[in-house]
Image (spheres, helix red, strand yellow):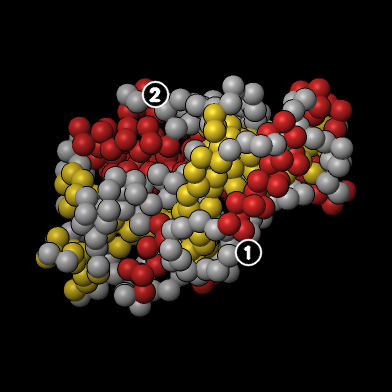
Amino acid sequence: MRVVVVGSGVIGLSSAYNLARMGAKDVVILEKEYLSYGSTVRSASRFRVHFWAEENSKFALESKKIMVRLPSITGWNILVTTGGYLWLLFNEDEVKVFRKKNKMWDRLGIAGKFLSPSEIKERYPYVYVDDVLEGFFGPQNGSCFHNYVAFGYYKAAAKLGARLFEKSPVEKVLVEDNRVVGVELPGGKVEADVVLLAAGAWTDGLLRNLGINLPTEPERKEVALTEAYRYFIEPLIIDFGTSAYIGQALKGEILGSLEVPVKSGLLPLENTLDFLVKWARAVYKRFPLLRGARVMRCWSGYYSMSADSSHIMGRDPDWPRGLYVAYGDSGHGFMMAPLIGKLLAKNILYDEVDELMRPFLPTRFKEGRLIPEKLVIG
């Protein structure tokens, strides 16, 4: 059986590795550009376990367990840090929601801690808190280096026989008698018994060519990076007042983004002055000592946003046999990828639907079983 994985982001690579590990003899990865070209290489490299939807928190918790063990799995040190996430809250409604959700997180063993402004100032004296009502600290959350995660999965998959072909854009999934038979590239066809579409924001187009329309849309997101400083920002700080997130990269650069009005669709991957000015103002307000910091570069990437802001994985029985998807991650794909790849491989090879996977099947949209996720960052 040949499995073609379309897309070499961390989800596609995790899936390819797990497929090969579980016994698939012919795994081919087709990438339109270069290894991890899409959202993976543009990631902020963070992971967390705190989500509004319990299904997402459970999934993220199990995925994190794999993520932190990746060095022993792939042989690549992914530079894991667990400085936590600190949400800054500015009104009673925000605090009330976090207190309610913390009961659920406590039940899952991942309760966080509420901090007063004075406690925040004592822990993190560099943060301006005069306008903050309360903070919520999730110590289980952290970061790693996205490229080492991706390259590690690729190298591990290649050792097991998986093959990667870059500059191989898939234009169409080929179907005969309601069964997948391969994919079409500009230079010809590649035969396949199974096709896994893990191409992020570009997945929609391939599905629409098959008459399949899932409620997803790509949204362009922008990220900025400053010059390097001595390491001092331990947690990732999410500012509900400005919608900005701000953290520090391992080499010392200040990194982050914030929400700005965007148009959906595959917009050019470019940056805007509007974003940069708003993010800079948010940084200067929350970190007064960073006034005058020099922005070294900006970049953009896509969030593949689903209708409920939760990821989509698996298949619909009404689809052509052998067709699977893994996308619509709504900004959570990097952190969910280790478990997505593992459970998808079981689903493809053994027709097994794990209980953690079941809520995220594409059938949930027509069945009205949405997983509304409101805690989307960025």
Q: Which residue is drawn at 73% across and 50% down?
A: 242
Is residue 213 something that shows in the picture? Answer: yes
Disc 2 crowd rating (10 Å Cα; few below 14, some 14-19, many 20+) is: some
Which residue carries the number 1 mark?
261
Q: Which amino acid does label 1 sit on?
A: Pro
* Observer-nearest of 287 and 317: 287
Residue 371: x %, y % from top left: 60, 58
Q: Indicate which label's residue lies in the foreground, 2 or 1.
A: 1
Q: In this view, does 278 lie to the left or right of 353?
A: right
- Furthest-bottom residue in this view: 211
* Observer-nearest of 253 and 133: 253
Residue 297: x %, y % from top left: 49, 43
Which residue carries the number 2 mark?
77
* Observer-nearest of 25 and 171: 171
Q: Is residue 131 above or below residue 362?
A: above
Quarter assignment of residue 41: top left
Question: Of helix, strand and loop, which one carries label 1?
Answer: loop
